[in-house]
């Protein structure tokens, strides 16, 4: 099922934006308010500490890599992923 950034904001879901660069997965954390996050996942805009367990994938290649991580890595078992529609 695909998701939009507006869906994530309306549901107040913190997320990782997944993309690929030269075949490598790149994950960028974002607060549900839409602000990008620093390494400590503290939002400078709204002040909350975010918990990014949802991965919005910008393309099919990124989604495939993330799905493999979720199914094969214990550290990602609690994550969910979906294709991002802009």
Image: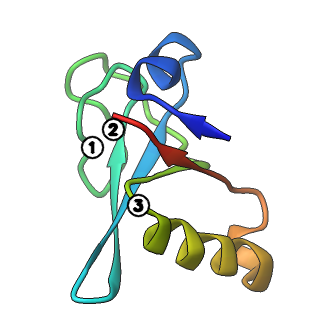
Looking at the image, which residue is at 64% across and 79% down? Answer: 69
Q: Is residue 63 above or below residue 45?
A: below
- Of residue 59 and residue 81, the one placed in the foreground of this image is 59
Quadrant, the C terminus = top left
- Tell me the residue that label 3 is attached to: 59
Mark 2 and 1 residues: CB-CB less than 8 Å, in contact? yes
Q: Tell me which residue sits at (79%, 77%) in the image.
A: 71
Q: Which residue is mark 2?
A: 42
Give the percent coordinates (x, y) of residue 25: 37, 78
Please, is residue 56 above or below residue 48 in the view? below
Quadrant of the rendered structure where residue 59 is?
bottom left
Q: Position of residue 74 (x, y in %)?
A: 77, 79
Task: Estimate the spatial distance between the alpha carbons at disc 1 and disc 3, rounded to whole Å.
Answer: 21 Å
Q: Left or right: 52 with respect to 85?
A: right
* Real-space CA distance between mark 2 and mark 1, rounded to the nearest whole angstrom: 6 Å
Q: Position of residue 39 (x, y in %)?
A: 29, 58
**Residue 29: horizontal and vertical position, in percent?**
35, 50
Instruction: Please tell me how crowded label 3 is: few (under 14), some (14-19), or many (20+) other residues with Cα within 10 Å.
Output: some
Mark whose residue sits in front, 2 or 1: 1
Label 1 sits on residue: 37
User: Nearer the N terminus, badge 3 or badge 2?
Assistant: 2
* Mark before the other along the chain sequence, 2 or 1: 1
Q: Secondary structure at mark 3?
A: loop
């Amino acid at each position: 099922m695909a998701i939009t950034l507006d869906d994530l904001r309306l549901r107040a879901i913190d997320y990782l934006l997944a993309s690929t660069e030269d075949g490598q997965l790149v994950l960028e954390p974002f607060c549900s308010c839409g602000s990008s996050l620093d390494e400590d996942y503290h939002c400078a805009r709204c002040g909350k500490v975010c918990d990014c367990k949802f991965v919005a994938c910008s393309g099919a290649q990124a989604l495939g890599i993330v799905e493999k991580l979720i199914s094969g890595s214990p550290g990602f078992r609690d994550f969910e992923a979906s294709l991002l529609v802009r």
